[in-house]
Image (tube, rainbow, N blue to C red):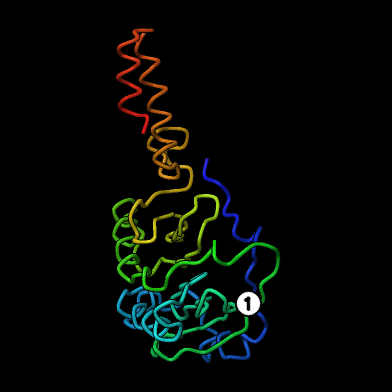
Amino acid sequence: MKPIRSASALVMLLLVASLAAAGCGGIGSSRGTNSGAGDDDSFYRANNFDTALEAVRGKVGPGGDILEIRVEARRTNFTVRKGKTEPATGSSARAADGGDLRDFDVDVVGSGSLDHQSIPASDVTAAALTRMEKEALKRDPGAKLGTIQFFSLAYDTGLQRPEWEMNVHGRLYLANLDGANFHSPGEKAGTADDPDLTPVESNAIRLGHCIAQSNGDVQKIQRCQKKFVQ
């Protein structure tokens, strides 16, 4: 079973009402957050997301971190910090001018350290979105650009790695930081191929299966241990 994302249990990042004051509550009309998902300036297109991402990298500097990203068709929100001792801040980009960032306040609530929830800004790539979009389409022909609801990225403290979420055509998918290991929640749970297991955990399951098939043969058991025990 996939561990519950526990980042919020340690340090919860809250977007304050100033987000709306910064002009991020809408795009000058009543268009919904997913309106225009397939448009040329949609943030679901990697080149547009990359424009906003580059602007954020320039803002936080080479040592800057990303704490959370929320990508919607017309708006992308970044929660970031410039250095290891700096507080969390927010930047929002809007479609049609992705490089023009607008600031919003972030409140950090709870105990814990942001160090354990940070993703180097240089590690995040726009290509991850394209990779996930292709994988989703392979699984579901209806999972086209216009049916994407959102992408979000945060550090999963349970899995101890960054993880993307993608909601498309009414389905939720998960993926690694680079868009690889694309899967549904709970996929292959309880097996050695569970994408949410660490290599040590996967090998432990494989070792158990190997020993179970050895019928008590000492030499076979030793071969199992040599193969799966690091």
Q: Picture coordinates of residue 45 (x, y %)?
A: 33, 75
User: Which residue is at the far right?
Assistant: 110
Depicted 226 relative to depicted 93: above or below = above
Of 34 and 221, nearer the camera is: 221
User: What residue do we see at 30% from left, 78% from top?
Assistant: 47
Give the percent coordinates (x, y) of residue 50.
34, 78
Is the residue 8 above or below the residue 26 in the image?
above
Residue found 61% across the figure and 64% down from its top: 113
Image side of residue 206 versus residue 160, left or right:
left
Residue farthest top in this picture: 216
In the depicted view, which residue is nearer to us: 118 or 68?
118
Give the residue at x 54% y 65%: 115
Q: Quadrant of residue 202?
A: top left
Going 39% across and 61% down the picture, which residue do you hit? Answer: 177
**Where residue 139 sits: x, y (%)?**
33, 50
Local SS, label 1: strand
10 Å crowding of disc 1: few (<14), some (14-19), many (20+) = some
Three-letter code, disc 1:
Leu
Near-viewer residue (84 or 1): 84
In the image: residue 14, left or right of residue 140 = right
Q: Which residue is mark 1?
A: 15
Q: Quadrant of the C terminus?
A: top left
Rendering quarter of residue 120: bottom left
**Residue 213 in picture, x, y percent from top left:** 35, 14
